[in-house]
Amino acid sequence: MISGAKVRLGHLIRNQHSPCLKLRSCYSHRKIHHLNPLCSYDNTKILCKEGKLTPPAFGHFNNFFTLPGIANKKKEYIGKKIVGFTPEQMFDVVSDVENYKKFVPFCIKSTVTHKTKHLLSGDLQVGFPPIVESYSSTVSLNRPHSVRAVCKDGKIFNHLTTTWKFIPGLKEGPQSCHIHFYLSFEFKSMLHSQLANVFFDELVKQMEWAFVKEAEKRYGKPSLPTVKL
């Protein structure tokens, strides 16, 4: 899978006539150390550094799909699972935007700029091979039932919406809940979109599970094993 990803990214760079020739060279290595924005194309900061690149582990992710059409930049993901934590506990983890930088994969910065009981605004910066971008979101809070984040600045996304719903779990497991996770996004840049085809399935998978792992750190051993639905 990794060699296939190399071919696809190399094809992308040639077709886009990217000035970042270094990206093609450094991607031939199999590991990355720290990523620095050394060049850009299509208003996208390209992360490359002499050294080695480490792409995320590639794998098949059935719930992640691209809508029909090669030129269509919209992507959606739906994930459902039962976890051994209460809706209140999972809500508190997901709504803790200020600390995303500490436990969400590839989140470099996370700052809450305004917060009320039912609404907050936050600025996020994400970096993953080979791009880094910043954006702002408005987050609606309905404890312990749901968290919904919508990108509001429109610099890199035509739209970005993330919705978490927390529903009481099994009767025989009161310390549990059903999690419904929905992500929908569309990049303005075709370059972003084509890179997403290579990287984002695994990134979304890692991000979703990071919240469950963070709940384990905060609240201890879950009352039951996590089950994907």
Image (cartoon, helix red, strand yellow):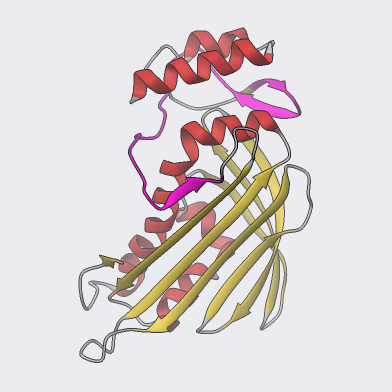
Where 114 sits versus 129, above or below? Answer: below
Q: Hey, which quadrant is residue 96 in on the image?
A: bottom right
Where 45 sits versus 155, above or below? Answer: above
Screen quadrant of the C terminus: bottom left
Q: 158 or 214: which is nearer to us?
A: 158
Residue 92 is inside the magenta segment: no
Q: Is residue 34 left or right of residue 15?
A: left
Segment tinted magenta in the rendering? 38-67
Please tell me which residue is depicted at 59% across the width and 55% down the height of the picture. 184
Please tell me which residue is depicted at 27% across the width and 76% down the height of the picture. 84
Residue 88, percent from left and from top: 44, 83
Q: 180 or 149: which is nearer to us?
A: 180
Does the magenta stretch mainly form a helix, a strand or a loop? loop
Please tell me which residue is depicted at 30% across the width and 72% down the height of the picture. 83
Where 198 sits versus 4, above or below? Answer: below
Where 185 sits versus 115, above or below? Answer: above
Q: Is residue 222 left or right of residue 101?
A: left
Image mark count: 0
Residue 227, percent from left and from top: 25, 67
Residue 115, percent from left and from top: 70, 74
Q: Hey, which quadrant is residue 225 in on the image?
A: bottom left
